[in-house]
Amino acid sequence: MTLRAAILISGGGSNMLKLLESMDADHPASPCLVLTNRADAGGLAKAAALGVPTAVVDHRPYGSDRVAFEAALITKLETAGADIICLAGFMRVLTPHFIDRFEGRMLNIHPSLLPKYKGLHTHARALEAGDAEAGCTVHGVTAKLDDGPILAQARVPVLEGDTPGSLAARVLAAEHRIYPDALRAFAGNFQTSRQSLS
Ligand code: GRF
């Protein structure tokens, strides 16, 4: 049975688009929902243009009540029947309340060579440290921020004269290469383990 994948975004959604484009007829997963916390997320229109259902849960009315915000996200995801959740530039920290619900079924792409540079401003931090290379990581999501099992990594060189912006663009191109492959492999394994249980 084809798995149902939901993608969570907060911005332009270039990784989301690569994931959606990769989910062809042979893929073990198909997209069931693109969900965002920002009504102005550029990725929303791109998903809708591909005929993928979209939904917005604005975090702001919930203030500091993260659990209520996440309960609203969970309702959307469960209504869509999501088996797998892909975080793709989703800029809200998720609490264990949410993560426990989907642990083992949730992936994230992070723009650094984890375990280096968890959190924000990864490219500026790599430049500041004088690193010769940077990169990105797809990992399983656990309750610890930007932690969890590493599923794929790609390395890119840091070039002379790089700015955080130029390095980010080089890393983003690598993200677009590894996230679709990592999702395909993850969904394939997930499907196999589900079949052996049934
Ligand atoms: C990517 O660099 C991702 O690694 C980071 O946020 C960025 C999202 O870009 N978490 P996009 O929305 O996929 O274009």
Image: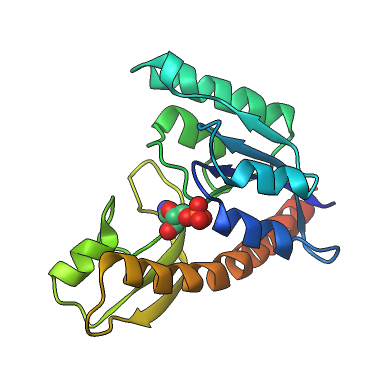
Name which residue lies at 14% across and 76% down: 130
Asked if residue 137 can be seen in this view, the reply is yes
Q: Residue at x 55, y 39 (%)?
A: 102
Q: Is residue 122 left or right of residue 175?
A: left
Residue 95 pos. (x, y %)? 39, 31
Number of disc labels = 0
Compared to residue 163, the image places residue 29 above or below, namely: above
Q: Is residue 178 above or below residue 95?
A: below
Protein image colouring: rainbow
Judged from this view, the residue extending furthest toward the left is 129
Q: Would residue 55 appear left or right of 67 to someone viewing this image?
A: right
> Is residue 113 visible in the rendered structure shown here?
no
Q: Position of residue 92 (x, y in %)?
A: 40, 36
137 or 53: which is nearer to us?
Answer: 53
Q: Is residue 159 above or below residue 84?
A: below
Where's residue 49, x and y in %? 76, 47
At x 42% / y 65%, what residue is drawn? 137
**Residue 28 coordinates in the image, percent (x, y):** 77, 60
Left-right relation of 195 to 60: right
